[in-house]
Image (cartoon, helix red, strand yellow):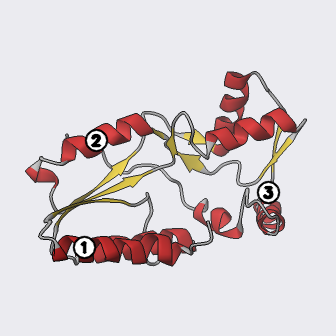
Amino acid sequence: GKASFGEAHVALARKVIAACRANGVRRVLHMSALNAAVTGPSAYLRSKGEAENAVRESGLDFTIFQPSVIFGREDSFLNLFARLLQLLPVVFLGSPNARFQPVFVEDLAAVIAESLTRMESFGKAYELGGPRIYTLRELVQYVGNVTGHRRPVIGLSPRLSYWQAVAMGLLPVKLLTRDNYYSMQVDSVCTSQLPF
């Protein structure tokens, strides 16, 4: 919506922390993102990193989840590509070699539920990804195969990917922005395995 990343990620996290303190709630589960860091390449990742810092400094019993892209029945990632593949005869794809480790929303929910009572998860952050790593091009091609809308996928160079993001960021519906482009400059893949 119209909320900035700072409002949606940081201010909201601080409000939740304040509400927990005011009501004697000790346990907090926080949804972040892979590569979240105050020094991240995009405003999205920086705000996620700032929110993580607020949670870590809250004094509460927290667990932080850092998923790669999340997919499921009504997600806004793979379904976006499904709609585009249905409409376009050819897909000109920015950042085609960006890497993701998509995690199924129901698996993510199961891990979150499992962590609620696991004392060993208190004070920890967990990277979450599915069993396979894909490039963005492979994901788009996969969606085309599954939906029956196979289309040629033409990968753009880094420079053209940037300018595509600039141009698409000017549209009323933001399919891609410069911030998305900056986020995709780091692979959204896990570096560690969940211990439970």
Q: Amino acid at mark 1?
A: Ala
Q: Residue at 28% x, 41% y: name it.
A: 111
Residue closer to the observer: 119 or 113: 113
Q: Position of residue 30 (x, y in %)?
A: 31, 60
SS class, disc 1: helix
Q: Position of residue 167 (x, y in %)?
A: 84, 66
* Callout 2 crowding tier (Cα within 10 Å): few <14, some 14–19, many ≥20: some
Residue closer to the observer: 151 or 171: 171
Callout 2 touching callout 1 (CB < 8 Å):
no
Does residue 72 appear left or right of residue 11 in this picture?
Answer: right
* Residue highlighted by disc 3: 157
* Callout 1 crowding tier (Cα within 10 Å): few <14, some 14–19, many ≥20: few
* Residue highlighted by disc 1: 19
Where the C terminus falls, by quadrant? top left
* Residue highlighted by disc 2: 111
Where the N terminus falls, by quadrant? bottom right
